[in-house]
Image (cartoon, helix red, strand yellow):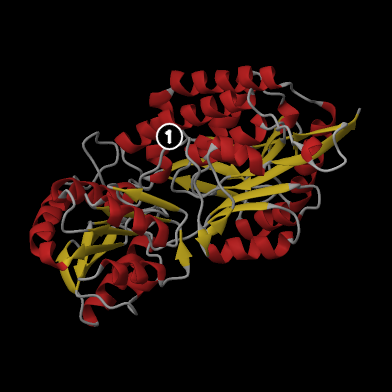
Amino acid sequence: MRRNDIQSLIAGRWTAGTGATVDVCDKHTGEVLAHVSTVSPTQVDAAVDAAAEAFRSTRLDLAERHRLLSRVADLLLAERDDLTRTIVAESGVPWKDSHNEVGRAAETFRLSAEEARRLVGEMVPIQGAAGQSRRMAYTLRTPRGVVGGISSFNSPLNMVAHKVAPALAAGNAVVFKPPLSTPLSATRLFELMLEAGVPAGLISLIHGDGAEVGSRLVEHPGVDFFTFTGSTPVGKDIQRKRGMRPVALELGSIAATLVCADGDLDRAATRCAQSGFRRQGQACTSTQRLFVERSVLESFTGRFLAAVAALVVGDPRDPATDVGPMISERDATRAQAWVREAVEQGARLLAGGERRGAVLEPTVLTDVRTDMKVMCEEIFAPVLSIVPFDDLDAAIGQVNATPFGLAAGLFTQDITRALTAAERLHVGVVHLNEASSSRVDLMPFGGVKDSGVGVEGPRYAMREMTEERLVTITL
């Protein structure tokens, strides 16, 4: 990639920030890819004020929203390879996952475009109430105004799409801040939205750190709705600062998958290896705890370790690579330290544990305890612990015992076991005969407890990003 200077989009113009300049580095080679000009708090204010004015003055009808967002989807696919190279370089996500992410981002825009044409309320049968026979009622979905957003580094394009596309489809203006570690694909997306014809005033992109720029955006009184993906402590701080103003928060997790004795062990082994280690385990739904029924523990573990050994680790630009570098060497060092601490406390290392710079080998532990960091804190790394169980209800209790509740997977061919577990697992998403990280972009996606509030997925996010208004008519 060529080196360039990254600016912010404020009030319809690309603008240099007046804050510090930050280097964006290739996560595998360390090469400087670009220089990001960060904004000042005053520029955050200007971006929000401009978005609010654009919202008041520029209203797109549903058909026009559909046309513009569909055009963005086409443009994303037209430069799929270039965007893939950008994601690989700035995030370290291997080529095949990055290439898939561009396709998913296009799909997210296309889904949002379709939902824009279906954004309607519903009839309310108040005429059935006593004394109301001469009245009618219906609801409207109206945009909230300015949607502010912040995303995480682990999905630098599609995560942005999941916040921006539904906001525009619902008729809002947007002010968005991507991570400083992965700002390039988000910047290119905003360029493509302008090329597609999205009114410049409706989309603002600001670059900066979370402590100053992010906090200013969160607290700004002109931001009517806020959507955030990131850590639970930051999410709680955002909710506290926002008060009564609505938010959607997709936060941390210690995701679990359960493998029962009657499950398809070959499929479970492959899917769990992918769930635990693809994207370097840096997804909130990556399987971190793998519960296996004891009667098949030995048989399954052999299959699973074979699937892990088959993963290709190394250069993310190699199309064969499954596991590349983590977002930084510091994060890889931290994760390795957790693994070593667990081993010192009695855990047994079945695979991995070695590190080369930011690349941590897929690591499998067993003989773990619930009080070890690898079991009770989100590691956000390619580290997975195998835990045997004898009783499914007890295993579900262990899954539910953490403060988190985002997603879980369960492998079984017993329909009663499957549906009972789906009711008892205290998480936002349950995947039967899939691992915890399975996600389709059109589905509702969100967590419970400390894993967040609100739901993503274009149709469902658009309901979050609109207000419901009741209208009654007396004949």
Q: From the viewer's perspective, tell me whether residue 38 is left or right of residue 58.
A: left
Residue 298 in percent (x, y) is at: 8, 63
Rendered image quadrant of residue 378: bottom left
The residue shown at (16%, 58%) is: 261
Where 211 falls versus 182 (above or below)? Answer: below
Camera-side residue: 18 or 326? 326
**Quarter of the image that includes the C terminus:** top right
Name the one closer to the observer, 244 or 16: 244
| Element marked by disc 1 | helix
Q: Position of residue 196 (x, y in %)?
A: 61, 19
**Visible in this render: residue 326?**
yes
Where residue 340 sits in the image (x, y, percent)? 25, 74
Disc tally is 1
437 shown above or below 97: below
Q: Is residue 69 left or right of residue 56?
A: left
**Residue at x-position 68% and y-position 41%:** 465
The location of residue 168, given as percent across then percent down, is: 66, 31
Q: Residue at horizontal 57%, vertical 29%? A: 112
As drawn, 363 above or below 207: below
User: Considering depth in this image, is 399 or 307 the residue closer to the camera?
Assistant: 399
* Residue at the far bottom in the pictured view: 345
Can residue 5 be seen at all in this image of the molecule? no
Q: Quadrant of the N terminus?
A: top left
Foreground pick, 235 / 136: 136
Q: Which residue is situated farthest in the front direction here? A: 130
Residue, disc 1: 86
Q: Alpha-carbon neighbours of circle 1 within 10 Å: few (<14), some, or many (≥20)?
A: many
Rendering quarter of residue 382? bottom left
Kindly identify the amino acid type of the residue bearing the numbered disc 1. Thr
Image quadrant of residue 390?
A: bottom left
